[in-house]
Each structure stands twice: as structure tokens, then as C-alpha cells.
Image (tube, coloured by chain):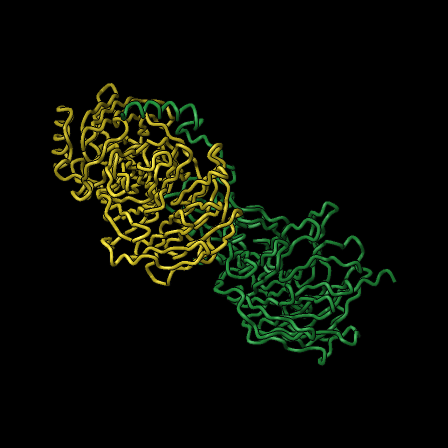
Chain colours: A green, B yellow
Amino acid sequence: MRTPILTALTAALTFASFGSISSGSAQVAPSLLPAAQPRPITPPEPAVSATVTRNEPTALEFTPDKLARLKVPAGFTLSVMASGLGNARIMHVMPDGGIYLTRRQQGDVWYLKDVNNDGKIEAVERKQVAQNIKLAHGLDVKEGKLYVVGEKTIWVMTMAKDGSLSVPRVFADGFPDAGQHPARSIHWGPDGFLYATFGSTNNDAPTPNPEEATMLRISPNGQIREVYARGLRHTIGFGWHPVTKTLYGFDQGSDWHGDNIPPEELNVILRGKNYGWPFCYGDKQPDPYVNVGNIPGKITKAEYCAGTQSSTLNYTAHAAAIDAKFYTGTQFPAEFRNDAFVAYRGSWNRTEPSGYEIARVNFDTANKPTSITPFVTGFVFEEGGEWKQFGRVAGVAQYTDGSLLFTDDQSGVIYRVRYTGGN
Amino acid sequence: MRALQKLTGRMKWTALGLLTLGLAAAGGAEMVQMMAPATTPLTATATIVDDQGQPQGTATFKQAGMAVAVTVEARGLTPGQHGMHIHDTRQCLPGVDPAVNEVVPFGAAGPHFDPGMSRNHDSPTAGNKYGHGGDLPMLTVGADGVGRASFMSDKISLTGMDGILNRTLLIHEKPDDYKSDPSGMSGARVRCGTIVRGAVATRDYPLPGVQTFPEGVTYDAKKGLIYTGSAATGSIYTVNPTNGAVNLFSEGGALGRSSALGLKVDSQSRVWVAGGATGTVSVLNSDGFPVAILETPKSPNRYINDLAPAADGSVYVTDSTRPVIFRVSPDLKLSAWLDLGNTPIKYGPGINLNGILATPDGRYLLTMQLNTGDLWRIDLRTKAVKKVMGGLMRGDGILLNPADPRTLYVARNAMGVVSKVTLSADSGTGTLVAEEPLQGLRFPATLTAVGTDVVVTQSQLDKLQGGTPETPFRLTRFKAF
């Protein structure tokens, strides 16, 4: 009985159903094949030194006389809508002009509305609508509900017409510890799922919780989620291009690796991909200042990086992107349409400070990003041999009239950029 | 002096030719068990190459009862004694020698094969609990540069836990002192041959990643896709069985999804994932996003290992450390279905109930207890438990042959074989009829049927506890035997 079976087996296996036998010749997408054998011991890496600088420009409270220091491109006008708002971080503008604002340090949400339409949000036009939301940060709206992420929880509140909110309820929970990067972000995606980013608890080493340093994709009821992308150290600003629906995210690179390593990244974020942190930056570049001992499989850093995704554009190291939004308004010249604005809060880890500005991501006629250029600058300056700054920009939003709003979380200012060049 | 005496002794062995080495101390008695025959007599050959890949001889291996008859002829060597060992992996390629952290010739062959986990280099007569199973007698090379040896060893086998198929025979430049770790001071690796079994055909599906550790496998005939999952990360991949193309289906790592053990596809083409120590059962829709992630009760000892969709739409789930079978109802509610404390199934240390399936007649569950080697039958209506058979130590995943539901295949992980069992009509008794190492399997964990073929995972789960896995990780397809 056994022998005939074997004969049939051999013949069938060799020529019929399998094609090839035991040769390992099956096709695998090259990007998925391991670049190397795992090693029995950590691979050697040469010693490397870095020159690093801690340089926190001296902080100055915003005062109106400093407005003259700020520069915007020709045709644009800058004004202040509100000040004294505390740790003003992320904004969400409602169609009627109401603005929900999170304050991370205060752990609350405010509702701001320029009722008298004078371009200023006076104290009577501000109200606290949620409190005791630890590390309240990213927020978004869907079907009459406001979603706010704080620390390890995403909260949901029902909105009333006057902007007030119901008592917060837990929408999703059990997210990773905040650690060094407590600025969480959420946006409802075009697929009806909620996307949320959770940065690393540390600077530049792998951590045991596989939900850290990721973008998560969460089911519409909040009950289930997946790791959508990983290797994202601290991606706060992200969103979908209005035309292509491509998902872009701005990632903050590691500290203490020198003035120019690693650059800040703009990534096209694809499902299931690894964006390299902590071992790789930019165009799959191995970061020489990260220890190799924790690489899974003890492969080399170069081998690991070969399996990661490149950034799409880079920006000056340590500039620290916070929020970002695509511009869909009509007030600005047509060339701005579908470009993105990003708040670079500013460096503390670079000889010459970077960031402290709102930058524009230029998209070409094919809707591909081509460059990142400064848009609102002047918050940081050198005076008498000392670096000073009077604004840490954080939130970005498009106002109902198509002007651009952004926040300074240091002095609690909301700035407004209008295009007035046509007049 | 002792080394010299040993040398003398060894020369006597070669002069005597076939002689069983280390019989008295072999293996560790608890691991010695009778193996059922393979589908064809177990023989293997190795083409011995130098570090340029040029053929420089041949070795043959023939299973003879509990031992293996070995012949070696290797050319181009310096006259004298040369250490000779079976090494862990199949690759006669350069690789890292951890002692110097440099790439050396044949370094990819890995360390000495050590099935007894002795962590000790010893003589070819030591039992495998005391010395590497791969410790062979030295090769004597004459003035003509040719070394010949002919001996028997029961430290190695072509099947079972000590199986050397798809591993390597390595010859070193110097004599072996039969004691110094890790390799008896035998110096550089100068000749290498991969031990290949003829007569059996298989097809490998290589998988991505260097830490993949594929445990579960299942096949969706409607979609024509194989699914496999990573025990280490929880990621699930699809494999096209025709062209071998692999795609990431569901990234692991989210809450409740950080490990994937048993996988099954249901009639709606949803993929069910046993979450191992995460204690969850996940159900993934066609784009890989979970429809549900079901939590079992919190415990430090959660070990959700395998699941079995039954004809009534329920899915039954084993836990390898908690004596309970869970049931997920068609509306995706999880509950404890059977408290095993009131049954003949007794949980002990290690991994208990593991592979599970429902018989096609809808009457029974069959489930494998790994640490006792017992196969159990559970009546779905009465919950009556009956022992089908024993003797299937380290039985992991189980599969009924779709073309012949009285034929059961058992993946026996540490034994490195797939066992074939013939069941009685009521699945109440079983007989072990064959045991196949195929081309050499690395910790085969689970099985699935693809047409008339079977696909098995080579999980290498033992390497999660230490050691270096071979990549690419693989699934292996073979004809049902």
C-alpha cells in the first residue's frame, strides 16, 4: 500500500500541482523578503560621536508690539484674534464659526465664538465646555459629537447648538502611556474609521508596547483597532489630501543626535508600513546614534532600514511639527488651494534654532508635495548674542472665511492670517 | 592523555565500521520512543563542498532502527584528524561566528545541533542530554587528503526529535577534543554539506521577516489564499499557493492582537485568530480589520491556542494552560463551554490542549493534548469525553484529510514530524500509521489542507526561547500521505 502511494506522490508533486519542489523558488514580493539572516549576536557598529546643543531660546510673553517682528508673504495680513488662552493647542472650526480649542496643560476644552464678528474673541465669547480631560489634545467632530483624545483615552461628547458639551464618555481606551510624547492626535478618515497617533514614550529606543509610536485605525464604535502604521516617533499633524485622499503625516525626529540629524519628516502613511523610528530616518538612512542591540533578529541597522518606508519630504531637524491642515478655502490665491500648512513649534536641541514658524507644504499640479517653505516667521530672533522667542506655534485651522488660524501655546494666542492682496 | 585514549578508541570504531555510538546513554530515556515508519525508507545524502562551493565529497545517511548509518568521504583536507559535527541549520553559506562577531565560512550553518538542549560539547558517545546531538566522531584524513568514515550513531536520526534532515554536516580544520565548548577546539569550518532526503517532494513558501515564527495556517478555498500568522508579532499574511506571493493581511500589535497562534477560516471567509497569551479570539474581515476581538477572562495564564469552527456556526477554542474549552456563538459571544476539571482530561505543567477540530458529521470535537500526547474526542451534544489514543507526544495542530475524514494528520512540533493517524468511523479510536519528517521540519506547528495537499508551518517556536531562527521562515506543502 505504501509504495504505490509514494510513487504517485512523487510524480504528482514534481510535475503537477506544485510546479517546483523544495527549491524555495516561490515568488515573494522583494520588499517582504528578509534582507538578511538573523544573527546569533548583535552586529558590530563603529563608535560615533555627536556634538549636541541644548538651546532653548529665551521665552518672551506675547505683547502686541512684537507683532511687527512677524513676517508673512506679500498680500497677507496677520492679526490676533485672542490672547491669554493658556496652553492653546489644537483647534476645530465648526461651520458656524465656533472654535473648539484643547488646552493640554489645563486638560480642558474651550468653545470660542466671535459672536459680534469683530475679528476678536473677547472673554464673553469664550467658555470652558469640558474639563478634567487629562492631556486633552487632538480633536475632531462627527455627526454632532466631539471626540477628544487625552493621554490613554479617547472621549466623546455630544455637542449642543450653543457649543456646550455633554459629560464626556469613554469612546476608546487602554492606549499606551504618554511618556515623553503626550500630544495625541485624532481624525476621522474618509473610510469612516478614526485614525489616532500615539508617540513614543521615549526618545530613541524600541519600547515593549507595540501600540507605541504608531498610527492606530479605530472602528467607528471605538471597540476595535489595528496598528495602521508604525515607526512613527511623534506624528501629531496628519490628514488626507483633499483631492488625492493620500494620507500625509509630519513626524518629529529624535533628539540629541546633532544639529541636523535626523531631519523632520513628511510621510505618506500607508497601511502596514514601518516608518523607521528609532533606527532609520529620511530615505531609509540608518541613524548612527541609535544602539543596534534592540533590533529584532539582531540584523544590522542597514538591513533593518531597508525594510522601512522613506519619507516624502524632509525639513530642518528639531523644528517639531505639531498640527497641520490642508487649505481648501478660496480666500487665498488659487496656488494655495490643497496645499498644507504646518506649525513647527520650534527647536530646543539645535545651535541655530529651527521652526518657530508656520510653513507651507507646496503641492504641484499633480497634487504631489514638492517642498516645505516658511510662511509665517519671526517668532525667534537673535538679539545681543542671545536667542529669544515669543511664540510656540501648535494648532492650525482654516477659519470659515478661508483665513488661516494658528495657536501659540506659550502665551495662549490665536493668530489669524488673511489674504488682503487683492484689495 | 585522555584525549589520546579517546582518539585511539575512535580509530577502533572506524576500523570496525558499523558500530552504534552512545547507545547506552543516548537521548534521555523519556525521549526515546518508537516512531512509526515514514512513507519511504529514510535515507539522505549530503554533497560536501568547500568554502568556494566546489564539491569535495559525499556523505550518506541511512536510518537503521534507532540509529543512523553514516558514511563520509571528503577530499582536499590536510592529513590527520578533523572534528566533524551536525550543525543546526541547512545553510552551507558564510555567516556570523558569535565568538568573534565576524562572518566566517559556513557560519550560516549555525551552532552544533543540540536537540537535548545540553548546551555542552562532548564526545560522540555522550547522551544527548549531556552533549550536543550533533557531536560525531572525528574524520581521519590520509596522506592523499581524503577522509573516509563509516559508523553508526544513535545520537542522530533522520526523523523525530534528533532528526538531522535539512541540517548540515560540517568538517573542521583541526581535531576535536570532545569536551571544549562550543566545538572541541576544532577550528575553522572547512567542509560543509546539507543533509538532503531524496524521494519526498515538498514545496516551500518563504515568508517575510526575521522574527516571523509562523504558528497558525489556514486555507480559504473560496479565495484561493493561505493565511499564516506570526506568534511573535500577531501579524497575519496571505500566501498565494500558486505563485507563492506573500502580502501583509493584518498588522499585529494592536490591543489584543499582539500574538497569533491557531488560525481558521469560517464559511463567511472571516479569519479567526487564537491570540495566545493575549487571551483573545479575533475575527478578521476580508480586508484584515477585526470584526471582533473577544476577551477571555483575565488571568496571568491565558494561552488561547487553537480554534475549531463547527457545523452549527459555533467556534470552539482551546486554552493550553486553563482547563476550559471556550465557545464563540454565531453572534460572536464568547463563553466557557466545557470545564475540563470534570472530565478525564487532566491539565499538567506545560502546554495542554492545543490543536482542535470539529468532525465533518458535526458530532465531535477532536483535540490534541501536547504534553501528554493524548488525542481526545468530545461529544458536542453530551460533552462526553473519550480518549482516542495516546503516544502523540508534542502533538500540536491537527487536520482531517478532507478527502478521507478517517485520516488525521498531527503536527508534532518538537518531534519534527507530521504523524498520520487512522481513526475509527466514530473517531473513538485511532492508530498511528506513518510519521513523516518530509525534508526535515523545524518545529511544525499547524496544518491546513490545500486541495489534496497539506501545508504545514515550520514555526521554529523553539527559537523564541533562545538561538537563532533560520530565515526565510517557511510554510511547506506536501502531498497528503
Q: Is residue A132 visible?
A: yes
Q: Position of residue A227 (x, y in %)?
A: 51, 54
- Residue placed furthest toward the top: B144
Q: Position of residue A352 (x, y in %)?
A: 63, 60
For the C terminus of chain A, the quadrant is bottom right
Q: Quick one: B161 or B85, which is closer to the camera?
A: B161
- Please indicate whether residue B22 sits to the left or right of residue B60 in the image: left
Q: How many marks?
A: 0
Residue B149 quadrant = top left
Q: Quick one: A338 or A278, which is closer to the camera?
A: A338
Which residue is depicted at the point 58% across and 49% down? A270
Residue A107 quadrant = bottom right
- Please indicate whether residue B81 sits to the left or right of residue B475 in the image: left
- Residue placed furthest toward the right: A423
Q: Quick one: B402 or A31, which is closer to the camera?
A: B402
Which residue is depicted at the point 46% across and 54% down? B253
- Please indicate whether residue B454 sits to the left or right of residue B16 in the image: right
Q: Quick one: B408 or B42, which is closer to the camera?
A: B408
Q: From the viewer's perspective, is residue A283 above or below residue B303? A: above
Residue B30 quadrant = top left
- Please indicate whether residue B46 sits to the left or right of residue A291 in the image: left
Q: Position of residue B452 (x, y in %)?
A: 39, 32
